[in-house]
Image (spheres, rainbow, N blue to C red):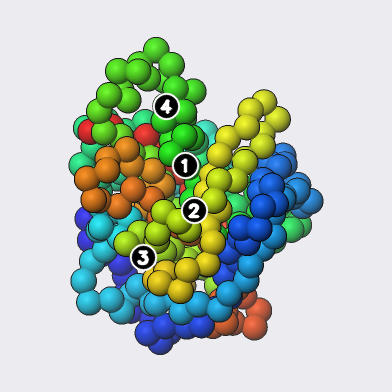
Amino acid sequence: MVEVIERETVGEAIEATVNYILDNGDKIFTQTASPGATDVRSGGTLDPHRVTIRNARLQAGPFALDREGFRFVRHDTKVADFFDEDQIRRVYYPEMEALVKAESGASRVVVFDHTLRTADDEAREARKIREVVRRVHNDYTEWSGPQRVRDLLPDEAEKLLQRRFAIVQVWRPIRHPVESFPLAICDARSISPRDFVVSERRYPNRVGQTYAITYNPEHRWYWLPRMRREEALVFKVYDSSKDGRARWSAHTAFEDPTSPPKARPRESIEIRTLAFF
């Protein structure tokens, strides 16, 4: 697996605003709307902060999934059209299973979900896909990580949960390079357990949990400028191991001050996997 494509002309770092959550006792939740909806209900008070976001293309060495909690990789896909559901499941799922195995060292990977997102309201309604998420979060908690195994693999869950497993996600642009609302990711080593606040994820048929994140000046943020279709971000959102390796990360879309004046709306896919060791 090779590292990311050639360096872009963006500088070493930028200053941008990211939306944390204020831990003031308010109930924190996100009401998951149907794909394409433009009115998303949520609870909790956002706490915007200016942060430094470092250019991952200019870092001296590679990132590591078990150290920073993420890796940017070069990865080509044979999917011709990411708006074709059949292609995603028939072609992309096996590609992602192989990628996560290679990056994590897992002996078994189960791809269980994917989400298409766009920053264009009209395209979102027309194609019935989801919005970009402009708040700092991690997709699973100490409870919801194992619960996802129980939900998806009920007959095997108790046996599988006796050994190490992780939830690993892969994010990439699906057409043109990202010019607006790119994804920033936070170095796992800079996140304190005290920064996590449980947030309910309310679905029509169940209630899950994610972590909202409170501001910490120690957070170290990274992004890959003008990320392309042949580049992917592999990142960890849960790891059952408590041996000192990265267990989580945190990520968010943000308004990029280097975006061109007529930036094309971001279009991306994220895929979720269970990785068993």
- Name the residue tied to disc 1: 141
Going by the numbered disc 1, the residue's amino acid type is Thr
Amino acid type, callout 3? Ser
Whole-number angstrom distance, CA of label 2 to CA of label 1: 9 Å
- Where on the picture, by quarter, is residue 73? bottom left
Answer above or below: position of 229 versus 208: below
Residue 238 in the image, given as x and y percentages of width and height: 38, 43
**Disc 4 or 2, which lies upstream in sequence?**
4
| Residue type beneath disc 4 | Val
Q: Is residue 56 above or below residue 30?
A: below
First in sequence: mark 3 vs mark 4: 4
Q: Which residue is mark 3?
A: 190
Measure how far apart labels 1 and 4 are at the Cα level: 13 Å
Query: Between disc 1 and disc 4, whose residue precedes?
Result: 1
Q: Nearer the viewer, residue 258 or 190?
A: 190
The residue under label 4 is 149
Percent from the top left, x then y, of residue 19? 60, 66
Q: Do the CB atoms of the residues marked 2 and 1 lie less than 8 Å apart? A: yes
Tags 3 and 4 touching, CB below 8 Å? no
On the image, numbered disc 2 is attached to which residue?
196
Q: Amino acid at mark 2?
A: Phe
Report the residue at 66% width, 58% height from top: 24
